Image: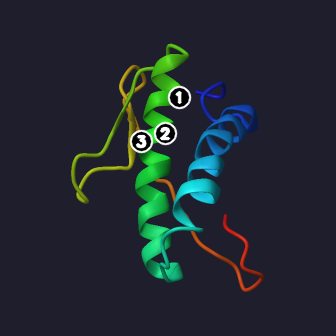
Amino acid sequence: MKDILTPTHWNNICNLVRPIVLNHMIPHIGLDNRVLSGVMSKLFEKQSEIYYNSIGIPVKKCSNDKEPDLYFTDIQKPYEIKVTSSDKQEWM
């Protein structure tokens, strides 16, 4: 379990998401923070699923809002991803 939640994995996922958001979403779509947060959450779910499966850690993303954002199938653990902006216009 400890290996799944390392900062290295999260940084790798952020590196997948960052260019999509910065190059394709923000410059071309005038979204308010609430809408952008929802879109980014879905993007993080999908990219996390792709990333973890590509390194041999089986995971599936949710198929509806009643399910956890990610479900690690081997260890049978659910995880939620939270995306929010701060007052400084930074995203976490």
Which amino acid, by three-letter code, is at mark 1? Tyr
Instruction: Name the image quarter holding residue 89.
Output: bottom right
Residue under the image location 59 percent in, 47 percent down: 17
Q: Name the residue that disc number 2 marks.
A: 47
Q: Quadrant of the C terminus?
A: bottom right
Identify the mark at residue 14; answer none if there is no mark: none
Image side of residue 21 versus residue 87, left or right: left
User: Is residue 32 depicted above or below 78 in this figure?
Assistant: below
Examine the rendering and report whether any part of residue 79 can be seen. Answer: no
Please tell me which residue is depicted at 58% across the width and 71% down the height of the picture. 84
Farthest-out residue, front: 28
Instruction: Find disc 3 in the rendering and name its residue.
Output: 46
Question: Mark 2 near mark 3, Cβ–Cβ under 8 Å?
Answer: yes
Residue drawn at point x = 43 percent, y = 46 percent: 45
Q: Secondary structure at mark 2?
A: helix
Query: Please, what secondary structure does the residue beneath circle 1 have?
Result: helix
Q: Residue furthest right?
A: 88
Q: Eyeballing the image, is 80 above or below 33?
A: above
Residue 51 is tagged as: 1
Asked if residue 2 can be seen in this view, the reply is yes
Secondary-structure class at tag 3: helix
Separation of marks 2 and 3 at Cα, in angstroms: 4 Å
The amino acid type found where label 2 is placed reads Gln
